[in-house]
Each structure stands twice: as structure tokens, then as C-alpha cells.
Image: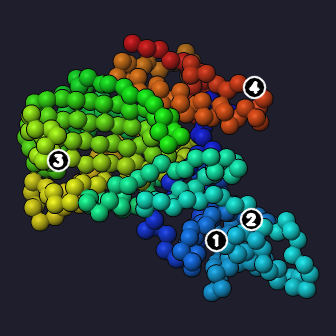
């Protein structure tokens, strides 16, 4: 087993509410677990293990009947929205065995997002999914990613990427980044909110000349800026940027956005990533005062995401090689990234302990998908 795989006992964002029309079967894989989900006629989203209890046929490749029941495409066993088998065509005159039911996957739909718990269902009642009010705030315009991104990389790599803007140069140089980003001091905040241990980076700068994309979105050439990145949970990273002319931060002159990054591990080498950008209603971009700023950000942001995806895929491939004495170097600006690793590894260790009966990997031996690895700090 690799030193870091993923956390299973956690709420993960299966998708935005709008992605779940009534009576449409969907198949997903989260934390190596196959899941079938659909929105029932009554309006609620339900989810189950994506295997017929008879012969393992994937129910996501079956069909929903007009009755609302899910019919397995292999032998015709039918299930209701509680997961109970209600019909077996090959033995219509016999009682349905009590074990003929699907394993339920807990689901919560809130704030425009559908969340599932792929781990131990008994533990899901102790904590709610994190809130995403920006998605449904009537005072804001929110636009989600056009489609989920499927990235061949461990999701910890994405979380580390999202907590860090020191990579804005050189990776995003010329759009949202420049060398000046690398010089902005980083403050670290940690705590617990809603039952989740979070880690946040805070970067403040004054008299900063905005790169091209930010100038287009937020109008100003030179600004005072407050920029935060927060790992809210293993499934959500929140980014906020507030800018204004120098000395006017905290006034009506403030522009900015909230970027919600919704992510889940497919397995130890793959992830699914969605994002949603929200800006204040009435704000417009520099080049076109007839459209909301959020629409312009959503139009341009995929170019930034593509650069991150390019980097993540190449990072992941390097885990295919043996370490042979290689150890990652942690810089001063990486403090939040290191804490995120520790938080996630602690969660992973806690859920592995009952099965393994012993401790988990230490931070010094973390290797997302390889044979080990050390950690050095500079």
C-alpha cells in the first residue's frame, strides 16, 4: 500500500445540483468505491453501491423504469429508492430474500452541491458537509465549471496546488501570475470549523500591479490585495480574493471573487475536480460592461486550470520512479502544504487503524503513489 492514498470517511462533492436531472442514472467512482446515483421523482438524490446484489452487474449501466424502480440490465432485479429489492423476475412466486438490497451511500444535498460519503456509513451522521453558500447567494453571480475535470493525479497534489500561489510564477506568468507573487509574505491560519480541521494561507500586499487576467476581471491597475486559500475539508478548497485601489480595501470600491474548488479522489492516482466562481452582482469586467464579472472569469479561467492540470499530471508521473534517496524539499512558503498533508494523513491513519491494528505512515515517509520518500526543509 502506498503511504498516501485518500481519505474515505469524508463528505465528497459528487457534483452540482444542476447535474442531477430527475430519473437520470449516473455511475461514479469515489475513493475506489463504485457508486450509482440518481434524482428520484420525489426530488431527492439517492446513491448506492453500484453492484447488483445478485451478480455484481453495474446498475449505472441499467435503467430506471416508469415506476421509479431501478431494473438491473442483467437479470431484471428491481430496486426502489431505499435500495430494497422489490422484484425478481426469475422467481415471482417466492419471497424476496432479506439480503436482496443495495448498500446505501449517504447523500446530502445543500447549497447547490450534492455530497456523498463513500466510507463507513455509520460515521456520516456525526458531521455535515461543508457549506458552499456562494453557489446559491442571490446577491452574487455564480458560474460553475462547464464539466468535471478528470485528472490522472492524486488529489493531495491538487490540494497542495490550490493552497499555494508561489507557483503563479512561472506556471501562470502572463495571466494571473508574475514574479511579484513569489515575494508576497505568507501567513498561516489553522483551526476547526464545522467539525473539519482547516488550514488557510493569507497573503496581503499593497501597491501591487495586477497581471492581465486580474486587471480584466477587477478593473484596477494598482491595488491593495487580500488573497486567501483554505483547505476547508478533503473535498473543498475555498479561494477568496479582494482588491481595491490602495487604501480602499474594506470600502465599496472592493472587487474580487470566491473560487470554490470541489474535488474527490477516484483512487490513489486519479481525481475529479470542479470549480465555481462567484462575484458580486452588478460587477462587470474591464472589456465588456454588459456581462457579469463571473461570466468573464468562467470564460478565461479554464486556461489557468489547464496549466495546473499540465503540472499535476507530470508530478504524478514522477512517482512511478523509485525514490533512490530522493526527498522533497519543503520551503518556508510550503508550511500550509505540509500541514495539509499532516491533516489528511491523520484522517487516513484514523480510518485505517481499526483494520490494520497498528500505526500508519509518518509524514517523513509520505509518498503519494510510490515506495516512500523523505522530507527536507529549507
* Disc 4 and disc 1 in contact, CB within 8 angstroms: no
Q: CA distance from mark 4 to mark 1?
A: 39 Å
Q: CA distance from mark 2 to mark 1?
A: 15 Å
Q: Residues within 10 Å of mark 2 (few under 14, many from 20)?
A: many
Q: How many marks?
A: 4
Q: Residues within 10 Å of mark 1 (few under 14, many from 20)?
A: some
Q: Position of residue 105 (x, y in %)?
A: 66, 58
215 left or right of 135?
A: left
* Disc 2 and disc 3 in contact, CB within 8 angstroms: no
Give the foreground label among 4 and 3: 3
- The residue tagged 3 is 255
Can the viewer see residue 269 in this picture? yes
Q: CA distance from mark 2 to mark 3?
A: 49 Å
Mark before the other along the chain sequence, 2 or 3: 2
Give the SS element for disc 2: loop
Give the SS element for disc 4: loop
The image's mark for residue 61 is 1
Q: Position of residue 37 (x, y in %)?
A: 60, 66
Q: Quadrant of the N terminus?
A: top right
Q: Residue at x 57, y 79 (%)?
A: 41
Mark before the other along the chain sequence, 2 or 1: 1
Can the viewer see residue 298 in this picture? no
285 w.r.t. 60: above or below: above
* Disc 4 and disc 3 in contact, CB within 8 angstroms: no
Q: Residue at x 33, y 42 (%)?
A: 239
Give the foreground label among 4 and 1: 4
- The residue tagged 2 is 102
Q: Residues within 10 Å of mark 3 (few under 14, many from 20)?
A: many
Amino acid at each position: 500500500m502506498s503511504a498516501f492514498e485518500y481519505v474515505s470517511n469524508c463528505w465528497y462533492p459528487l457534483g452540482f445540483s444542476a447535474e442531477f436531472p430527475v430519473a437520470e442514472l449516473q455511475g461514479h467512482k469515489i475513493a475506489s468505491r463504485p457508486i450509482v446515483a440518481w434524482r428520484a421523482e420525489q426530488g431527492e438524490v439517492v446513491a448506492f453501491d453500484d453492484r447488483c446484489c445478485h451478480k455484481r452487474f453495474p446498475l449505472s449501466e441499467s435503467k430506471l423504469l416508469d415506476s421509479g424502480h431501478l431494473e438491473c440490465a442483467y437479470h431484471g432485479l428491481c430496486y426502489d429508492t431505499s435500495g430494497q429489492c422489490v422484484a425478481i423476475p426469475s422467481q415471482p412466486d417466492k419471497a424476496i430474500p432479506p439480503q436482496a438490497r443495495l448498500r446505501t451511500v449517504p447523500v446530502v444535498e445543500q447549497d447547490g452541491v450534492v455530497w456523498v460519503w463513500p466510507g463507513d456509513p455509520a460515521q456520516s451522521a456525526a458531521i455535515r458537509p461543508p457549506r458552499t453558500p456562494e453557489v446559491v447567494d442571490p446577491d452574487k453571480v455564480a458560474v460553475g465549471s462547464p464539466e468535471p475535470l478528470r485528472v490522472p493525479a492524486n488529489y493531495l497534489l491538487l490540494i497542495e496546488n490550490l493552497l499555494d500561489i508561489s507557483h503563479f510564477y512561472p506556471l501562470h506568468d502572463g495571466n494571473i501570475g508574475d514574479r511579484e507573487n513569489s515575494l508576497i509574505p505568507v501567513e498561516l491560519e489553522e483551526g476547526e470549523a464545522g467539525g473539519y480541521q482547516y488550514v488557510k494561507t493569507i497573503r496581503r500586499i499593497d501597491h501591487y500591479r495586477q497581471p492581465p487576467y486580474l486587471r480584466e476581471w477587477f478593473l484596477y491597475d494598482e491595488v491593495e490585495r487580500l488573497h486567501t486559500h483554505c483547505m476547508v475539508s478533503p473535498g473543498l478548497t475555498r479561494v477568496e480574493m479582494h482588491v481595491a485601489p490602495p487604501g480602499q480595501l474594506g470600502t465599496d470600491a472592493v472587487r474580487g471573487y470566491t473560487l470554490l474548488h470541489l474535488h474527490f479522489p477516484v483512487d490513489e492516482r486519479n481525481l475529479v475536480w470542479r470549480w465555481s466562481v462567484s462575484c458580486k452582482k452588478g460587477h462587470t469586467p474591464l472589456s465588456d460592461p454588459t456581462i457579469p464579472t463571473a461570466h468573464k472569469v468562467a470564460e478565461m479561467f479554464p486556461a489557468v486550470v489547464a496549466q495546473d492540470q499540465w503540472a499535476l499530471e507530470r508530478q504524478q508521473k514522477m512517482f512511478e520512479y523509485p525514490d533512490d534517496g530522493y526527498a522533497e524539499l519543503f520551503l518556508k512558503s510550503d508550511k500550509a502544504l505540509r500541514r495539509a498533508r499532516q491533516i489528511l494523513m491523520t484522517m487516513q491513519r484514523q480510518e485505517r487503524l481499526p483494520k490494520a491494528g497498528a500505526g500508519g505512515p509518518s509524514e517523513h515517509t509520505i509518498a503519494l503513489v510510490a515506495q516512500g520518500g523523505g522530507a527536507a526543509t529549507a
